[in-house]
Image: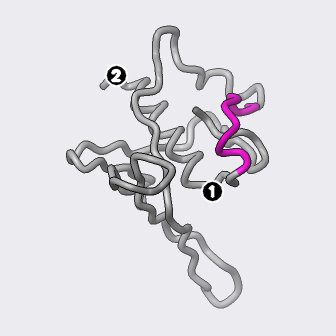
């Protein structure tokens, strides 16, 4: 898998893991990214190779004065009925398929789609 395809996969799964609301899940628009995100555009010729649906949580821990993010934890499924688990998502952030292949993501260029923007497809 090309490095750019892995980045697209990681970005796609991140958007899903962030809990895009059901109404947005049917929205096929690309996310409205700020100008500092232009460098993240996939090169011409790349295309989505996997689409998954996730059920999971964001885990936080109380440190005595504030909630601190610990890790995501989700199971990714082949369809919107949540049949056929195909991968898991956990700290890293990491996405690991049933085949054992992994993608470990990083936040690039200080770019994060807002919670009200459309999920990446």
Farthest bottom residue in view: 64
- Where does the image place residue 60, in percent across and percent down from the top left? 58, 76
Q: Is 115 situated above or below 66? A: above
- Where does the image place residue 37, in percent across and percent down from the top left? 68, 28
Query: Magenta segment, principal secondary structure?
Result: loop
**Which region of the structure is painted magenta?**
23-33
Give the residue number, with chain letter if any, for mark 2.
2
Which residue corresponds to the image point at 57% horizontal and 36% vertical from the top-left?
108
Q: Is 63 situated above or below 120? A: below
2 inside magenta stretch: no
Name the secondary structure under disc 1.
loop
The disc at residue 50 is: none
How far apart in space, not on screen, are marks 2 and 1 (Cα)? 27 Å
Which residue corresponds to the image point at 54% horizontal and 47% vertical from the top-left?
14
31 inside magenta stretch: yes
Give the residue number, with chain letter if any, for mark 1.
19
Q: Residues within 10 Å of mark 1 (few under 14, many from 20)?
A: some
- Where does the image place residue 82, in percent across and percent down from the top left? 44, 57
Marks 2, 1: nearer the viewer? 1
Name the secondary structure under disc 2.
loop
Which of these two is toward me, 35 or 54?
A: 54
């Amino acid at each position: 898998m090309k490095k750019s395809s892995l980045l697209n996969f990681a970005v796609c799964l991140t958007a899903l893991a962030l809990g895009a609301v059901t109404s947005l899940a049917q929205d096929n628009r690309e996310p409205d990214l700020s100008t500092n995100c232009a460098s993240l555009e996939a090169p011409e010729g790349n295309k989505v190779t996997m689409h998954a649906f996730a059920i999971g949580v964001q885990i936080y821990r109380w440190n005595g004065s504030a909630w601190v993010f610990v890790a995501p934890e989700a199971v990714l499924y082949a369809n919107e009925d949540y049949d056929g688990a195909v991968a898991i998502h956990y700290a890293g952030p990491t996405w690991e398929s049933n085949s054992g292949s992994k993608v470990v993501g990083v936040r690039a260029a200080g770019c994060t789609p807002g919670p009200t923007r459309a999920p990446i497809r």
